[in-house]
Amino acid sequence: MRKYIFGELQYTENIKSEQKGIILDDVVWITQEEGRCTYACKSIVSSYSNSERKLETKGALTPEQIVIMNKANNDCSSFIATSSFDLGIQTLDKQLLVHKVPVTVGVYRPTKKTDPSTKEKKIENQCLTYNEPTEASTGHFIVVIGIGYEGNRKYYRFLDVGATNITDGNNENNKLYLDGKQIKGTSNYFDGDGRFYIVTEIRETVITKK
């Protein structure tokens, strides 16, 4: 394993397997205001601009977003990859590895509810969407800042604007694993309660030279 440092940017490359990883560890996490995860993610991306380039997140309307997963049923208990899944992965990887910019992605997440009779907290599937009329069922947005590998298992590191503190928001355990035609993982913010994220869409970062 070789490791390169470009300023505050760490770049690792596994020469033997040709697996390439990157972590943009100087991207600054912020927490969202209630119901405004999209705006927090846009702010994180735009604040990564510098004197040479301006960064902006593409809008919500197709074809500006790349929807990679659709719900397979009405309760969002299962999902199916779209024909744009490979394009979404290619776009995400290129933005991170080539352009070295953070990327906003939409995710589905189940909800945590309290049973009124037992007072126990339960995890339930529930379709919440920011981008009707698509079937992506995006219920939250996060910012991907890196790619890594655990053996041959590829994952994406992310910042969770839904967290209320930096320990959870920018945690090394915030990982989304690529497993066949699905990107799924969990946030340190969930504290092991059974909730998870499934990436549903990619919001490409627009790079404009100044």
Image (cartoon, rainbow, N blue to C red):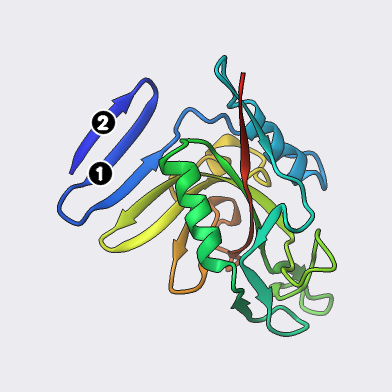
Q: Which residue occupies the foreground of this view, 172 or 146?
A: 146
Circle 2 — which element? strand
Residue that appears at 31% across and 48% down: 20
> Which residue is label 1 attached to?
13
Q: Which residue occupies the foreground of this view, 8 or 30?
A: 8
Q: Is residue 87 left or right of residue 75?
A: left
- The quadrant in which residue 194 appears is bottom right
Q: Is residue 134 above or below residue 16?
A: below
Query: Residue 61 — which label?
Result: none
Circle 1 — which element? strand
If you read the primary sequence from the N terminus, does the residue marked by circle 2 or circle 1 appear first?
2
- Where's residue 75, x and y in %? 76, 81
Residue that appears at 53% across and 31% down: 27
Q: Is residue 99 above or below residue 128?
A: above
- Where's residue 65, x and y in %? 69, 55
* Mark 1: amino acid: Glu
Q: Which residue occupies the foreground of this view, 169 or 143?
A: 143
Q: Which residue occupies the foreground of this view, 175 or 10?
A: 10
Tally of numbered tags: 2
- Within 10 angstroms of label 1, few (less than 14), some, or many (20 or more) residues? some
- Where's residue 46, x and y in %? 66, 29
> Which residue is label 2 attached to?
4
The answer to the question of whether label 2 and label 1 lie on touching residues, with beta carbons closer than 8 A, is yes
Is residue 183 something that shows in the picture?
yes
